[in-house]
Structure formats: structure tokens, C-alpha cells
Amino acid sequence: MLLFILKGLLRDRSRSFFPIIIVSAGVLVTVFLSAFMSGYMDSMVRQNARFDTGHLKIVTNAYAEKLSQKPFDLGFIDIGDDFEQWKTDFPGIRWTPRIYFGALLDVPDELGNTMTQGDVFGMAIDIKDETAVRDIHLKEALIRGRLPRKADEILLSEDVFAKLDLKLNSTVTLLGSSIYGSMSLHNFTVSGTVRFGVEAIDRGGIVADIYDIRAFLDMPNGASEYFGFLPTGVYDDVQVQTIKKQFNAKYNTADEFAPVMLALTDQNNLGYLLQYMSLTLGMVSFVFIIIISIVLWNAGLMNSIRRYGEFGLRLAMGERKHHLYNWLIVESLSIGIVGSIIGAGLGVIVISYFHVKGFNFGAFTKDTSMMIENVVYTDLNAKHILLGMIPGLLSTIFGAMLAGIGIFHRKTSELFKELET
Amino acid sequence: MNETLVQINNISKIYPTGEGGFLALNKLSLDITDGEFMGIVGPSGSGKTTLLNIIGTLDEQTSGEVLVLGKHVNKLSSKESASLRANKIGFIFQTYNLLPVYTVYENVELPLLLLQMKKEERRKAVMQALEWVGLTDKMHSRPNQLSGGQGQRVSIARAMVKTPRLVIADEPTANLDTENSINILDTMLKINQDIGTTFIFSTHDPKVIQYLKRVVTLIDGEKVKDDYQTGI
Ligand SMILES: Nc1ncnc2c1ncn2[C@@H]1O[C@H](COP(=O)(O)OP(=O)(O)O)[C@@H](O)[C@H]1O
Ligand SMILES: [Mg+2]
């Protein structure tokens, strides 16, 4: 009987070909969307983690309260012993200190008088630490010159460099206020320029070695933020939340300058964004289930009306209604399976392609402050394939069940009359 | 004397309609004996199809009793009536109702698939049925490659393939020309004579009527005549 049913299905293109196309298209789109959004979220998480949030970070209570302003003057002045303690408490986590600060960049002429000035936003990292350099892809971001090697060398963003009409190895002066509020001045040599593709930093950024900046800001062994990265290098919210709970239970007190740990999802609205995105994905696939079901139902319904003759005939031959109905579902399920497999196959091809090639969002990210990499790669993972097949299978069964109701709602003799006329 | 195959005692059929219902069969009684070649005759709307559907257990009477092969049809469970149809009753329709996506062979095979018969047995039965109607050479054709007369012969083969006790044929010649009508009537009569299958027709076609050995005439749901004919 199965063979007989499938034979009929294959020979009737309107019952097989068209629905299979609909199902594969739906599955393909869902697989792609799922993989793309996942790739997008990963990219966003990575980019934020590198530049802004870490997988987790330790700041002072006071700093945490004004986190978005990055008030380095509320940071840790000297953290030596505490830091050693944290390291032993949470082995495996890679720690790296950062200082974010604002200052005035002053370019003197030959006589030492101010020629031009500009506001800059500085990011100080441990440049002697290879991994810290890799965190922000500093080498890849380098446009001219080289990374700072000697004391008092800095990198300027290419935009600032061009705007101030500077040359490599020019001397520039940073003007700012120390952590105690007093005026501070420091001369630097421009060793190179960078562009990250992150607008916030590219517009007016400088990158310096944290040892020089500690001197400049008068915080000898301090940092405004301590970034921590999980050993795997991949963000895992469950793991991070556990560590955060342990850390805060042990170290966080009411003191203004007591350390507090923040997870990536506590910052930049990322927790909300990530939730929102998975919710969106869930909704998209739900909408797909509904749309495909309705389309298939209509296809199924038209077919059923066209097939009432066949159903009437089969009932007259002594087939029972539930038997007929079950076969209708078997038919749909076959369509659903074939369509889903085709859609998933195409999906694998498409997401593999974009997993390698990626989508270049450079043109779009240029003018936003969104922390997103210029090229987003689709996530290549079996879960997207499975997720995509759910609407494919559910919608066909759902569609057949809706169409099949028509059989049960008619009396045998009525189904039968449809074939007389 | 042969046994009574169908026994109809004083049945009425009322179709529910807006006001009160429509009386399609009115206190009708009729016995049909095993091996008959008989017809229900009457103008359009006289209740022929209604009566055949009740005999074929596709519909139920409103009152009175109907026994088919000794069973009260309105007391059968849906499973029992399905089984009765699957095993003992064949249907032939005015529009042949062949399934277009299947070959002639497959169309004839379908009732046996529902009976879960083994492949070899099915093959034997299908070939036998196709031989009865003279279409062995068309078994790989699709219905749309057949003429009207050939199509109706396939549907006779489909009704006969399970060798039922009873074949119900509702206006089987209505879509056929004279030559084809006579051809299929000859075929059915031969089957009736060779293996004794009972045929119940509904018709208002004189060509069919002259073949019938017994003619029951209906008008407005009432049996007005019940004649045995000799001839042909
Ligand atoms: N489902 C139904 N509901 C209401 N009236 C019906 C229904 N089926 C048939 N009838 C009516 O019953 C009468 C007999 O119909 P039918 O048995 O099909 O006649 P025949 O086959 O002799 O042409 C007709 O008047 C028809 O309109
Ligand atoms: Mg009729």
C-alpha cells in the first residue's frame, strides 16, 4: 500500500512537486536565518568581548555604576595582591587589564607651541602581552608603522592621524587629568596608525601601552577594568554567571571601591539583545510553520476536493475513514520529509558558503556605533539544520490534518456524490 | 431456489432539508435473489441512487429494515459495513472514477490492496478480471489513454476483481454510446451467467432495460412496478 500511495504521489506533480518546493524553500530560509542570526550574535558577542566587555570583567562598585562613562578615576589604583588572589581563585581564566580614558591630543610645532589639538579616546592595553594584542586584533588593525615597542610610543587611529596631518615618529602630547584630579602631561611618539572597523574607536582613538598610561594617569599598578576570558575563548553565559556569583559573594562588599564582577550579558544591553534575537528567531520559525501550513493546507484542500472522488471510491471499496486519513498523513509526511531533506541540503550548501565567504557589512557598520565585525559568517552547526526541519515537518502534518478534517466532516454518501457530479 | 441476497422491508428515506425533510424513498419493499440481473428504473430524481446507496451500505434508511447477505445494514458497525463492502460488494459508477495517476492494472489492483492480499494472488485476480472485460493488452495504459467504453470496462474489472457476490451499477451506460453500452452489458451479462454474480442496475436507458431480467420501476420514491422479463 505504501508503495502504491507513493507511486500516486510521485506521478501527481501538483501533489508532490509544488508542495515539496514550498517545504524546501521554507526549510532553506529557516536554516539560513537561524545560521545567520547565530553567526551575527556570535560576532556581536566576540566583538563586544574584545573591545568592551570581556567575557566578564572586574571593576569597582563606583565604576560599575557609571560604566558607560568609563570613569577611570573610579578605577583600581593599585591592585597587585588582590589580582594575584583572583588568579588563584579562578584558574584557567585569562585576565588582562585595561584603562579607558579621555584626553586632549596636542601636536606641537618645532618651537613647542600648540599647532593643533583634538579630543581623543584612549584604550590602554598590555601591549607586551601577545594575547592581549590579539584580543583586539591590533596587528591586523595596523595601517602604518608598527606596534609600540619602546616606552612612550602610541598608536593613533588612522582618522585622527590624517586629520591632524601627522607623520610617523612625530611627537605628540597627551593632556589630561590624573586619577587624583591634577593636570597631567606626557609626550609620546607616534609609532603607527590603526583602523579597527569599530566606529567608536576609529573616530578618535588612541591605543597605548598600559604601563605608559599608568604613569600618565598616576595609577602605578592600577587599571580601570580587568577583563577575563574563558579558557575556551567562547562565551558561555552559564559558566560566566556561576563564576560571577562566586566572585561577588566572596569579594563584593558595600565599599565604593570594592571589586564587582560583571558578565558580558550585564553590559551594553547585550543580555537583552541576545534574548531578543533568539526570541525573534523562534518567532520567525513559528511564522514559517503557520505560513507553510496554510499554503500546504490550501494545496492539500484543493487536492482533497479534487480527490474527494478518490476518497469516496476508496470508502466504497471498503476502506475505513481513519485508514484513509492516516494515509493522507503518510503522504504529507513523505512530502515533508523529502522537502525538508532537500531544503536542509540546500541550507547546508548555502550556510557553508557564507560560513567561508561571509557577509560584508562594512558599508553598513561604517556609520553606526554597533559593535559588530565587518564581515559576518553564518554559523555552521547541525542545530540550524534541525531547527529548519521542524517547520518543514510540522507544517506538512498540520496541513494534512486540516485538509483531512474535510473527510471526517462528510458522510460517505456525500463524498460519494462529489464524484457523481 | 436461490437464497435471498437483499431483503428490503418497508423502508423510507428522508433527507434532512430546510423544512421537514425530503422523502426520497417511500415505504419500499423489495427482495433480490442471489444471481439476479435486475434494474431499478425510473426518471431522474425518483430515488434510484438513494436506494442503491442504502443497499451498498453507503447510506442508511430512515425507517424500515434492510438485510444484505442476511445482515441488518443499519446495525452494522462502520468496521463491519466496510468489511462487507470490501469483500462482497462491487461498485460501478456513471463516471468511471478511475484514478488518473494509476495504470489500468493498478486501478484494478486497488481493492485487493485494501484486502491485504498477497502480490501473487493479486496478480492472478487482476489478470483474470482484465480478461473478463477483454483489456489485458491495455493494462499498462493510463485512464486518459482509454476510450469511454474501455474506461467503463476497467471499472467493471475493478468491481469484479475481488469476485463479489453483488455488483451495484448506478447508471453505468449514461456516458456511453449505443455500441459501447451494448458491449459492456454483454460483458456483465456474461459474468452473471458464468460465475453467478448478482447485478443491480439503476438506469433509465432503454438499451439497458432490454437486457434486464427483472425491472423495478420507481416514481417519486415509490415502487410502482416489479416486472420479470423474458427475451433477448
Ligand atoms: N443529500 C441529499 N439531501 C437532500 N436531498 C437529496 C439528497 N440526495 C438526493 N436528494 C433528493 O432525493 C431525490 C432522489 O435522488 P436520487 O436518489 O439521486 O435520484 P435518482 O438517482 O433516481 O436520480 C432527488 O429529488 C434528490 O434531489
Ligand atoms: Mg442517480
Image (cartoon, rainbow, N blue to C red):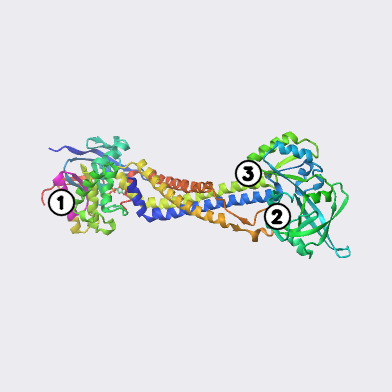
Give the residue at mark 1.
Answer: B211
Give, as a three-letter code, the residue at label 1: Tyr
Q: Secondary structure at mark 1?
A: loop
Dot 1, crowdedness within 10 Å: few (<14), some or many (≥20)?
Answer: many
Q: Are marks 3 and 1 on the same chain?
A: no
Q: Is mark 2 within 8 Å of ligand 1?
A: no
Residue A249 occupies quadrant: top right
Comparing labels 3 and 1, the label whose residue is closer to the camera: 3
Name the image quarter holding the N terminus of chain A.
top left
Dot 2, crowdedness within 10 Å: few (<14), some or many (≥20)?
Answer: some
Distance from label 3 to label 1 (Cα)? Answer: 90 Å
Please tell me whether residue B187 belongs to the stretch shown in magenta: yes
Residue A237, placed above or below residue B152: above
Distance from label 1 to label 2 (Cα)? Answer: 100 Å
Give, as a three-letter code, the residue at label 2: Leu
Q: Secondary structure at mark 3?
A: loop
Give the residue at mark 2.
Answer: A138
Disc 2: host chain: A
Give, as a three-letter code, the residue at label 3: Thr
Disc 1: host chain: B
Give the residue at mark 3.
Answer: A232
Q: Position of residue A118 (x, y in %)?
A: 81, 60
